[in-house]
Image: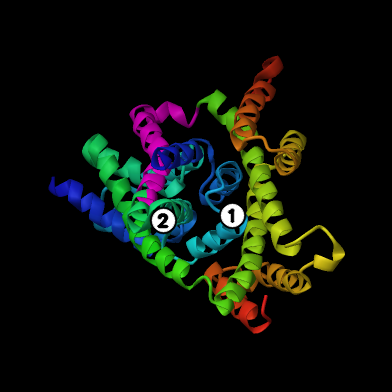
Amino acid sequence: MKLLLKLFAVFAKVGVMTFGGGYAMIPILQREVVEKQKWASEEELMDYFAIGQCTPGIIAVNTATFIGQKNKGVFGGIFATLGLVFPSLVIISLLAGVIEAFSHIVWVQHAFGGIRICVCVLIVNAVIKLFKKAVIDKFSFVVFLAVALAAFFTDLSPVIFVLVAAVLGVVIKNAGGKKA
Amino acid sequence: MIFLRIFFEFFKTGLFAVGGGMATIPFLYKISDSTGWFTHQDLANMIAVSESTPGPIGVNMATYVGYITGMRESGVFGAILGAVTATLGLIAPAVIIILIVASFLKNFRDNKYLNSAFYGLRPASTGLIAAAGLSVAASNFFPEAFTLASFNWKGAILAVVLIVLTNIKKLSKIHPIVFIALSAVVGVVFSF
């Protein structure tokens, strides 16, 4: 029980100190989880991150589940993950209430008008970054373009694109006995 | 029962969004379109707040969407319940999958079929985010209609400035929160 609470507390701390998630979390995990608690080695942490990237869900959540599971089984995984999301729940709930209450004020609306432009730019930058890693040949470029256009101009669920792309990836890579 | 629906929608998001927080954005737009719980404008605001607060972006956005949806349905109590159900829904698939994966970790990374699935998945996920970005841009640069008269010139100028600033090597280490704050000030000063 003590270790479960400790997992919850340490990952809550990681959650508070992470701005943006993903890679921003690595140095904090190194200090809290590897150096202070010794719950995982440096190499294990990198492995968890790599696997977290290629399994569904938020990478930070995947990593927390892995480390919790390794140290205290299934409940360890659950407690570490709940710890990680706990600060988000508290902070966003407080903020959302405040922002809703002030949202009718004109200058708040102007501020968000400016902020939304910045959000467009942040998404563009995220796409550029991901594009460099994901689009490595003609096939992946065609998939990128087809999905981007189809998702923009149709009402199809993103789920469909994800499933079709996964199947296509397997078929193309493994067809005709070519090496994967 | 709206809270079951919230859980289900976010469970779906957590299961199919591959590659971190930004990958959930296309799913959130889909939820907006199919349920009407919140508008595209609401969503863009939520993305900005989620980027500017502690915690993983994907988790923050789920909490925020759940909170607002629950609040519009049944007040403060609904808001808290909505925030919790959305967040639990988002993380549930990942927790289940990782707990299973952890038991046969060694073979997982070298699995040929899994790696080839991701060969298709990664560009698709990137394409989905690009499409979501286009939707955000469309609703911000053409707020009323797709005509030159309603084009948001002030916004376009700010966007160009921000694209240049965020892609200068020396400035790329600066946290997005700085640019978000800057844009808020510009928005107030030039009444966006």
Side of B192 where A94 appears, left or right? left
Proximity of marks 1 and 2: CB atoms separated by less than 8 Å: no
Q: What range of the chain is rendered magenta?
A: B82-110
Q: Is residue A119 above or below residue A171?
A: below
Q: Quadrant of the C terminus of chain A?
A: top right
How far across and down, in percent of the image, does residue A116 sit?
62, 65
Task: Look at label 1 and name its amino acid.
Answer: Thr
Is the stretch drawn in magenta largely helix, strand or loop? helix
Residue A40 in view of the camera: no
Q: Secondary structure at mark 2?
A: helix
Residue B18 appears in which quarter of the rendering? top right
Q: CA distance from mark 1 to mark 2?
A: 15 Å
Q: In the figure, residue B143 lies in which quadrant?
A: bottom right
Q: Nearer the viewer, residue A131 or B94?
A: B94
Residue sitting farthest toward the right: B148
**Residue B107 within the segment the image draws in magenta:** yes
Question: Which residue, given by chain and number where applicable, does mark 2 sit on?
Answer: B71
Q: Residue at x 34, y 54 (%)?
A: B80
User: What's the chain of the residue with tag 1?
Assistant: B
Which chain does the residue under circle 2 lie in? B
**Residue B60 image position (x, y, % from top left):** 44, 56
In what element is the residue under mark 1?
loop
Q: From this view, report whether residue B191 is shown above or below residue A115.
A: below
